[in-house]
Image (spheres, rainbow, N blue to C red):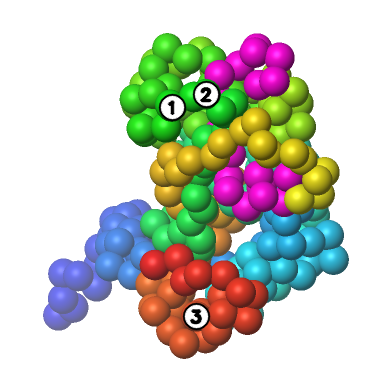
Amino acid sequence: MKHRAERQPLALLSRRTLVSGGLASLAFPALAAPPPTEIHLVSDAWHGLTRKDGTGLYFDLIRAVYARRQIKLRINVYPYARTVQAVKDKRADAWVASFMNEKDFALYPRWHFDRNVQQVLFRKRPGYAFAGTSDLRGQRVAWLRDFGLDKYIPEPMKVVEVDTIQSAMQMLEAGRIDYFIGAQSDLADDIAARKVDMSGFERAFVMHLGLYLAFADTPRGESLRRVWDEEMETFHKSDEFKVIYKKAGFDYPY
């Protein structure tokens, strides 16, 4: 006599096959897609740190991180606002040198690759010394367009965006703004390049800000962000990381 199971209807067997197959897929989920083999970076030309030919400290460092996963860099150098727009439009995977959460449409990693000193520039006034961000309260404060520094300064200010440091200094001289805030390295490069007479100006420390890759909000961007954080977890402590900074003549940013 045959077992009852051998006489089960085909439809019932089919349903059980589908159910068991579904359970198997739950037990063994599909493997995640492999990360891309290339990352498309966009960056402004940051005073020798990111050059149009793909050299510079930041590109060297980012290249070393992604080489650990055999991911190559494709690089375009544009003005800063254009790099941000390229990532927003999902025409690039990440832009170089964003402040944390600078833009709400980008994906931010845990690990920064550098940090910079933000300085305030102002006209000299007899007996005045900059005492910190509280001095900016209610003042006309400028920075380069699209930098959004008000996210990091807890004071109400009258924000002015400018296109160049030169125009900011002209506005300071004309009394149209009270302060300009920018990266120490950017200020130093601009002042040296234009041979600016600084006798009527002063600079002072405001804050440190970490610099990050800002990734496109796409599956590629998320995958590349994950790779970055996984590799930087150990790489930022390594001698190889420190040597890249030492060769470029910059301080270790951790």
Kindly identify the amino acid type of the residue bearing the numbered disc 1.
Tyr
Numbered badge on residue 125:
2
SS for dot 1: loop
Q: Dot 2, crowdedness within 10 Å: few (<14), some or many (≥20)? A: few
Q: How many marks?
A: 3
- Residue 141 point in image, percent of width and height: 54, 21
Which of the two residues, 7 or 254, is positioned nearer the viewer here? 254
Can residue 240 be seen in this snapshot?
yes
Residue found 48% across the figure and 41% down from its top: 204
Residue pushed farthest bottom? 239
User: Mark 1 and mark 3 in contact (Cβ < 8 Å)?
Assistant: no
Decide which of tag 3 and tag 1 comes sooner along the chain.
1
Kindly identify the amino acid type of the residue bearing the numbered disc 3.
Lys
178 above or below 129? above
Magenta span contains residue 173: yes
Q: Which residue is mark 1?
A: 128
SS for dot 2: loop
The magenta region covers: 172-191
- Residue 4 point in image, percent of width and height: 16, 69
- Residue 180 point in image, percent of width and height: 58, 29
What separation in Å lies between label 3 and label 1 (alpha carbons)? Answer: 39 Å
